[in-house]
Image (cartoon, coloured by chain):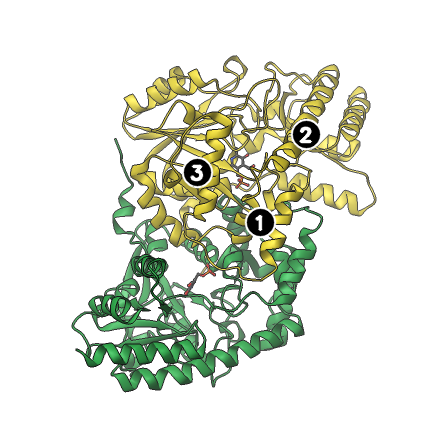
Chain colours: A green, B yellow
Amino acid sequence: MTRIARRMADIQPFHVMEILKRAHQLSAAGRDIIHLEVGEPDFPTPQPMVDAARRFLEGGHVHYTPALGLTDLREAISRFYHDRFGTDIAPERIIVTPGASGGLMLALGVLTDPGDEWLLPDPGYPSNRHLVRSFEGRPVALPVDATTRFQPTPAHLAQAWTPRTRGLMVASPANPTGTLLELDEIEALQQAVSARGGVLIVDEIYQGLCYGVEARTALSRLDDVFVVNSFSKYFGMTGWRLGWMVVPEAYVRDIEKLAQHFFISPSTPAQHAALAAFEPATLEILETRRHAFAERRNALLPALREIGFRFATEPQGAFYLYADVSDLADSSETLAQRLIEEAGVATTPGLDFGNNAPEKHLRIAYTTDEGRLVEAAERIARVLKHL
Amino acid sequence: MTRIARRMADIQPFHVMEILKRAHQLSAAGRDIIHLEVGEPDFPTPQPMVDAARRFLEGGHVHYTPALGLTDLREAISRFYHDRFGTDIAPERIIVTPGASGGLMLALGVLTDPGDEWLLPDPGYPSNRHLVRSFEGRPVALPVDATTRFQPTPAHLAQAWTPRTRGLMVASPANPTGTLLELDEIEALQQAVSARGGVLIVDEIYQGLCYGVEARTALSRLDDVFVVNSFSKYFGMTGWRLGWMVVPEAYVRDIEKLAQHFFISPSTPAQHAALAAFEPATLEILETRRHAFAERRNALLPALREIGFRFATEPQGAFYLYADVSDLADSSETLAQRLIEEAGVATTPGLDFGNNAPEKHLRIAYTTDEGRLVEAAERIARVLKHL
Ligand SMILES: Cc1ncc(COP(=O)(O)O)c(C=O)c1O
Ligand SMILES: Cc1ncc(COP(=O)(O)O)c(C=O)c1O
């Protein structure tokens, strides 16, 4: 009787959930587990944003908003682009969404016909290929490696493009590798894509989380691009489910239609919290956190290198390290299992991020304080000496 | 350069937004507008739920939850089915979603292959056909009328079923008609559907909002059914974006995968508010409101009948009246325009709900207090006397 749609055979779960489940079992049994697998900041939502939401909630009047979001919030985001990047974006092109996830769904829903191919760097954020598949598109992996900082180039694109290709998705900073694209590189990709009649989607969800380099946006160079962003990571709002997207004007009306039916509107309390996201008091908190992330990275990276984790490229953003562990184990999955069982350290095996040498890679998130990170490295070192 | 996916040509906006826009213009110009077009309760979220959310937010620790929702909330919903309906539902079969909208997306995403047909009563909730189309399914309208209380029967089904039919979607109480299905009727529909190898989706979002009859759930009779529900309407939580769905066990794992990629997780503050939804203090507030809705209905229905609005069937649920206005105007759209311009009363023309005689029908929502409803009827009467 059960008949499940064919697409589901191609849609994988987040494999890291298995590690997480095991971590919870071990914790419940009294083991101390250090979590290096978690893709969200450990910091709470900044107090000015929490206060804004709590004030809004006082009256209890929590109704639907327009499908594209509160006008005030769209204008605040527009001002943010102006103040931070010197870029003028009309509020009408800004779509408030339920997380970057919601933005990615709307973009792909409006752009993808059945059979359309999307080029996705591999390794990359796992949901992208499953969202493409959900709308009956075909995700096509672009295998990328340390030689191009795990980012695709026009050469990758030229090789993989077919008459059915609809476009390219990139992320900067990227998950799982933490690497950035230079604006020149994004512009070159956009030229290569649009010369072929395609569309470029740039996921800037980790914007603001970069270390030793300036935050940037594709929008300071390009109009004809879909830019996905979110309040989840830099702004510390994961559980609120709020993001935004900037799209070419010609797509706004269709995206609005789809947003009405998919979501009715984005979370109202989250939108009121986000209205305080760009206040100086909030931005000060966020910059302090960014410095803390930078210090964590600077502590963890050499400690892991010493153990034998290899990093061919220095990650400059997000809160991830993507380690080549092929000197330490035949399979990153077996290694991750060993690390959780023997060292009490949870990590994410490459498997979640694609099919490009996943067995050689582990993703390590520095979403835990520096003391714990150092302890994790020590524990891992102890276990691996018994190899 | 702009190339929009073919599905978008079939996806309509909520047409009522045009009326809403005009209402805002008139308000801004100083006109007093009575809103009978709004599909959400005017009441605030009950205080115990607001308090629960505000307490949770205090610490600012608003992180992702499991994709299927907080275990505590799934268990609370399970207890609610037990306490209110005497029905035992395993918490594992309960999926917490971003509104009923999210539940409908997950259900259709997991069930619909390209070209699959879904039978949808017409008039019906507009998003259903667009969500079916979004996953490349084919929405097939079942024209229903007052002779079957605007609900489909096994006879409708037998006539429309083809080898490509995947199933039937119904709502009880329904939008826009406010009519209910008896449990015997739901059971007969389920038998007719499953005898043909299909699936029945029952939308119970207006459960709890019924007048003169007991609230009911398909789950007290059936296991092999998808039941969609929401905290939006009865629980007064529209803007929070939270709902739930009960599914046959065999679908849970696939729905979890899709939920991870579509939504990551439902709103965390909303889930904490919802944990207080089933407390006696909350339920008492909700029952008081239900009585207020009943009184509004009892005041408005005869007043509109007197003006010439026809109701062949007495609506027993939701907060809508679906009026036959063919004695008053050739087109419900023209009438709605006249009512907003001349009477300052906003209503929803049938157009939003399908292609089955929409020009004859207006939807009137009693989501405004009784005094304003009576005034609206008086204003409409004055305008229509000048016909
Ligand atoms: C690259 C990337 N894009 C999008 C998302 C979705 O995040 P959200 O929906 O919380 O904004 C994530 C989450 O981890 C991500 O890593
Ligand atoms: C019949 C019906 N189903 C589903 C929905 C979606 O509501 P929500 O996503 O707020 O739960 C609505 C909203 O009006 C509705 O009327």
Q: Contact, CB < 8 Å: mark 3 with mark 1?
A: no
- In the displayed structure image, the side of residue B22 where residue B349 appears, left or right: left
Name the amino acid, label 2. Thr
Q: Which mark is residue A67?
A: 1
Few, some or many C-alpha atoms within 10 Å of disc 1 (few <14, some 14-19, many ≥20)?
many
Could you say where residue A164 lies in the image, as x and y percent from the top left?
A: 30, 57
Few, some or many C-alpha atoms within 10 Å of disc 2 (few <14, some 14-19, many ≥20)?
few
Vertical side of B80 occupied by B291: above or below: above
Q: Subunit of mark 1?
A: A
Q: Secondary structure at mark 2?
A: helix
Vertical side of B58 occupied by B126: above or below: above
Could you say where residue A8 lies in the image, as x and y percent from the top left?
A: 29, 47
- In the displayed structure image, the side of residue B116 where residue B344 appears, left or right: right
Whole-number angstrom distance, CA of label 3 to CA of label 1: 23 Å
Looking at the rendered structure, whether the residues under marks 3 and 1 are on a common chain is answered as: no
Vertical side of B214 occupied by B205: above or below: below
Residue that carries the numbered disc 3 in the rendered image? B245
Name the amino acid, label 3. Met
The image quarter containing residue B380 is top right
Looking at the rendered structure, whether the residues under marks 3 and 2 are on a common chain is answered as: yes
Residue drawn at x 61%, y 57% as measured from the top left: A271
Looking at the rendered structure, whether the residues under marks 1 and 2 are on a common chain is answered as: no
Which image quarter is the C terminus of chain A in?
bottom left
Q: Subunit of mark 2?
A: B
Q: How many marks?
A: 3
